[in-house]
Image (cartoon, grey):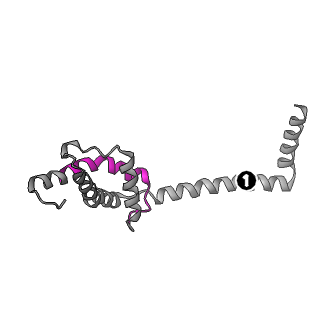
């Protein structure tokens, strides 16, 4: 126990009273600040603006809703039974499809999944209802 106190005191003395210690402490502090700033800048760059959110929503209610509707229609599901918004497997498939899209792949997944949860069920049910009313195989 006594040895630990001496080491801590020695380290504090080294950091405060020697040039190398002061430079090391300054370097560690600046390094930590740089890492935090870099992480925050990457997060803000990946946050979509209003136009990009609209593009993601169009992707969800357009391409991806048609994809899901075709799959559910092939399984014989009813439009009233659509419930893919909270299905983790469909969310993973959505993220994979989003990554394939050249313009939308770099955005934060949590924002994209929020848009997915808000919009997908109604879009898929609407596409499936059109198929059942028209009788065509096109979704």
State the count of labels: 1
Quadrant of the image for the C terminus? Answer: bottom left
Question: Does residue 114 belong to the magenta stretch?
Answer: yes
Measured as percent of width and height from the top left, residue 96 is found at 40, 59
- Left or right relative to 83: residue 14: right
- Left or right relative to 22: residue 58: left
Query: Circle 1 sits on which residue?
Result: 28
Q: Is residue 68 above or below residue 4?
A: below
Q: Residue at x 24, y 45 (%)?
A: 82
Q: Nearer the viewer, residue 116 or 125?
A: 125
Q: Residue furthest top?
A: 1
Q: Nearer the viewer, residue 58 or 22?
A: 58
Q: Crowding near pointer 1: few (<14 within 10 Å), some, many (20+)?
A: few
Quarter of the image where one finds residue 68: bottom left
Secondary element at tag 1: helix
Q: Residue furthest front?
A: 75
Measured as percent of width and height from the top left, residue 122 is found at 22, 48
Which span is picked out in magenta? 103-126
Q: Residue furthest left?
A: 134
Question: Does residue 43 belong to the magenta stretch?
Answer: no
Q: Residue at x 60, y 53 (%)?
A: 36
- Left or right relative to 111: residue 82: left
- Left or right relative to 68: residue 92: right
Q: Residue at x 77, y 52 (%)?
A: 25
Quadrant of the image for the N terminus? Answer: top right
Measured as percent of width and height from the top left, residue 126 is found at 18, 51
Measured as percent of width and height from the top left, residue 131 is found at 14, 55
Main SS of the magenta part reads: helix
Q: Nearer the viewer, residue 44 or 18?
A: 44
């Amino acid at each position: 126990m006594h040895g630990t106190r001496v080491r801590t005191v020695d380290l504090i003395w080294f950091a405060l009273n020697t040039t190398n210690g002061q430079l090391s402490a300054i370097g560690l502090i600046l390094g930590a600040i740089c890492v935090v700033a870099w992480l925050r800048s990457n997060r803000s760059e990946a946050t979509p603006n209003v136009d990009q959110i609209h593009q993601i929503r169009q992707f969800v209610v357009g391409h991806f809703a048609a994809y899901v509707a075709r799959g559910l229609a092939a399984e014989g599901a009813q439009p009233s039974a659509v419930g893919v918004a909270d299905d983790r497997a469909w969310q993973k498939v959505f993220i994979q499809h989003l990554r394939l899209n050249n313009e939308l792949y770099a955005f934060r997944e949590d924002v994209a999944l929020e848009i997915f949860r808000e919009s997908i069920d109604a879009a898929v049910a609407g596409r499936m209802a059109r198929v059942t009313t028209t009788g065509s195989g096109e979704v």
